[in-house]
Image: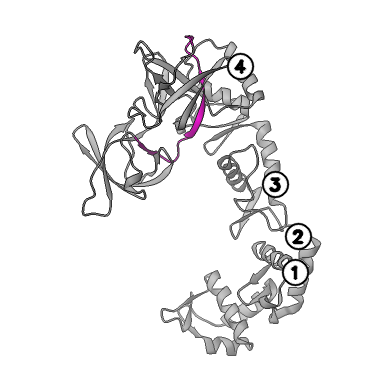
Amino acid sequence: MKLNYHEAGGLVLVVPGFRILKVESRGSGKLTEIVCESIAGGLEEGADSQFIPGFKPVKIKSVVKNGEDYRLRIKGIARSSLIAGGMIISSGWPVTETREVLLLPDKKPVPSETEIVRGGLCPDFNRERFIGRGSFHLEGSFLSIRFPKPFPVFPGAVLTILGANRVPRKFTVVWPGIPSLDERRKLNNMARRRPDPHPEAVEIYGRILHVRGFVEIPQMFNKNSWEGANLVGSWLILHDRKKVLEHKIRKIVSRPGGADKKLLRIPDYPENLVLSLVGDMRGKGTLEIRNGWFFPVGDPPLSPYHRGWLKKIKDAGEEGVSVRSVNGESDKAALEVLLRSGYIRGGEGLWFSLEARELLGNRLMDGRKKGERITMAVARECLGGSRNRTLEVLSILDSDGTLSRSADGDSRIVM
């Protein structure tokens, strides 16, 4: 984001990107071409971008300056989804699309009629009026505005209406959406102590931080000192709230089988904040990842039921346990837990304990040199077992990177 001055005084945030002026007719190429104006420096080719409204992912393949405008070649989005006035912005900015927005008032009467609103991402966003008129309502020390369609905003953004006398009125976004009653009470208490209708954006983010306990901030704020808070990824979170969230995360990943990203969705906390904190905990060595699942550090926890199944597989030794012999859904789920916890291997035709996998793998690979080819017949003779067992061992060694299937598929190559 970039800081720009506006007529009401003070600094406002503007999201860098491109505002679409024209979508070109379909040419002979496969890429869509659009004519845009650059906002706050635009974006570079290859940037991870999205089209707003709608948060549709976009890939910028080329950017060419053409006089005052820019010609972009993009892919990843249907031409029919693009509209003049829409914007292509970075995927990394904390923008929200919402039908309701809480605003700091400008100390003038509440607009009595619905109004066309511009601004938010950049001063000219919604000049084409594709979002429609917004209606204003008094909300304690604030105004709320409600739109017929979701409007993209972020804390500190400035929205503008012309009003009945065509004189611009500007409102600063303090909260995307409508806060809870408790959050609104805290915000109202803060508002009474701050008469300026357009405080610095940093102050607004600080208000949200101390009311909600966390807030996603623009990259330009990352070097600021925020007392009582930790920076985790693009999020600020208060120390006490961070401890609470870490405890919730540890509790979830400590279940048998750990947790993937879907299981790490925690009510009242944004998904990206949770995943950012999970990454932070992993970097500090308090969490680890196995087969794409998160676990506490050390031996993954198991229930007595899982330990019973682990004993069965260990007792089966090199013969393994047939996948077909396991019919119950709870039994299948238990074996999946053991697999992703790293206690067993296989799963295509047989389940093996780690000890059996090591014995069988060592028997096949003993004395082999890099680049040597191993046929199915040789592998089966070496392992001295059924075709089913040989295929399972070869599959495990393939997944470990010990072997690689040859181009003809008839043999493996020692890696």
Q: Amino acid at mark 1?
A: Leu
Q: Is residue 36 visible?
A: yes
Mark carried by residue 188 = 4
In the picture, the quarter occupied by the N terminus is top left
Which mark sits nearer the N-terminus, 1 or 3? 3
Viewer-nearest residue: 48 or 125: 125
The x, y position of residue 295, in whole percent, is 67, 54
Q: Which mark is residue 250?
A: 3
Label 4 crowd (10 A; few <14 / some 14-19 / many >=20): some
Give the left or right position of residue 117, taking residue 304 as reference: left
The numbered mark, 2 or 1, whose residue comes first in the sequence reads: 2
Q: Residues within 10 Å of mark 2 (few under 14, many from 20)?
A: some
Q: CA distance from mark 4 to mark 2?
A: 49 Å
Residue 293 position (above or below residue 384):
above
Question: Which residue has dot 2 on it?
Answer: 302
Residue 127 spot, x, y in % from top left: 33, 27
Residue at (45, 24) in percent of width and height: 134
Instruction: Give the alpha-carbon distance from disc 1 to disc 3, as whole Å.
Output: 24 Å
Give the magenta-colored segment's residue range.
86-109
Q: Nearer the viewer, residue 137 or 58?
A: 137
* Viewer-nearest of discs 1 and 4: 4
Position above or below: 182 against 41: above
The residues bearing labels 2 and 1 have C-alpha atoms spaced at a distance of 10 Å
SS of the residue under disc 4: helix
Q: Of helix, strand and loop, which one carries label 2?
A: loop
* Neighbour tally class for label 3: few under 14, some 14-19, many 20 plus, Cα within 10 Å: some
Q: Would you name the residue on which mark 1 appears?
A: 310
Q: Position of residue 342 (x, y in %)?
A: 66, 64
Q: Position of residue 326 (x, y in %)?
A: 71, 74
Mark closer to the chain start, 4 or 3: 4
Amino acid type at circle 2 is Leu
